[in-house]
Image (spheres, rainbow, N blue to C red):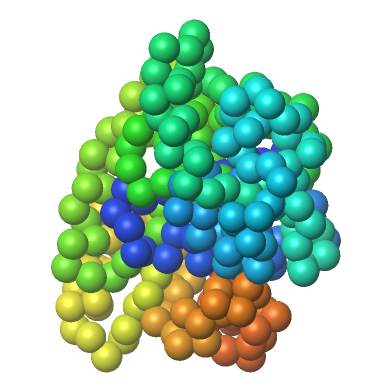
Amino acid sequence: MRNVIAVLNQKGGVGKTTSVINIGAFLAKRGKSVLIIDFDPQGNSTSGLGIDKNTVPATIYDVLSGNVNIVKAINSTSVKGLNLCPSNTNLAATELELANTESKEFVLKSVIDSLDYDYILIDCPPSLGILTINALCAAKWLLIPVQAEYYALEGLSQLLDVMQRVKQGPNPNLQLLGVAVTMYDNRNSLAQQVNNELKKYFGDALFKTIVPRNVRLAEAPSYGKAIMDHDKWSKGAKAYKQLTKEVQNRVG
């Protein structure tokens, strides 16, 4: 059964794209067919997988505009079984272009419904605009990466409120897959306090795997590689391998 997962936190710099790339790569390594949709105008998933976002012939923007069939916008990556629908700054124009479109919240859903992948991961923009609403209306699951820092909990209630509104309205099938703690420094007492607060608030929805702050993990995108290809023995690689197993178990 196809699983569409929106990976979202409206706060930037929380490891959202890193999570998308590496969960996608480990799912592919486990024999699953995976498509990453870079739905962020910054195009970080695109460049992080070694694809030049400024020279690709077609992006998700062209697909949403109706100019290109999504199949023609999909690129293979260096990871076998992992494909990417790229993005660049053109996507920012979609917010305005969709404003007066009928059923504007279902445009992404309409273009991916025909695709046949085990997993589709949507790297959402760090905002709660029309692009994000499209992602939530297309998804079955929501995965929220959270950095273990002072402002981690800020905005989460708003994000969960948006999820509930979507669930009660256009997408009743949307479910919270889980919350993943990222960029964790166990030497920092504040990080431990934040993690404890997240446990209290989310309970079983909090993934057991904690992704540590890791230099090899941080530098992998600059080489256009997933962490398993950059340094498979690093703490970051081991964490994302374990987190991916949790994701698979939760989706059943």
Q: Residue furthest front?
A: 55
Quadrant of res 204 = bottom left
Query: Residue at position x 64%, y 66% from top?
Result: 49
Residue 234, compared with residue 41, is above or below; it is below
> Residue 160 appears at what percent x and percent y?
31, 39
Q: Nearer the viewer, residue 59 or 14?
A: 59
> Residue 137 appears at what percent x and percent y?
51, 27
Query: Residue at position x 24%, y 39% from top?
Result: 158
Q: Nearer the viewer, residue 5 or 114?
A: 114
> Residue 103 appears at what percent x and percent y?
50, 12
Q: Quadrant of the N terminus?
A: top right
Q: Residue furthest top?
A: 102
Q: Is residue 211 left or right of residue 149?
A: right
Residue 103, compared with residue 128, is above or below; it is above
Q: Is residue 243 left or right of residue 2?
A: left
How many numbered circles are shown? Answer: 0
Query: Residue at position x 43%, y 39% from top?
Result: 92
Inspect this view and state whether residue 179 appears: yes
Query: Residue at position x 67%, y 47% from top?
Result: 85
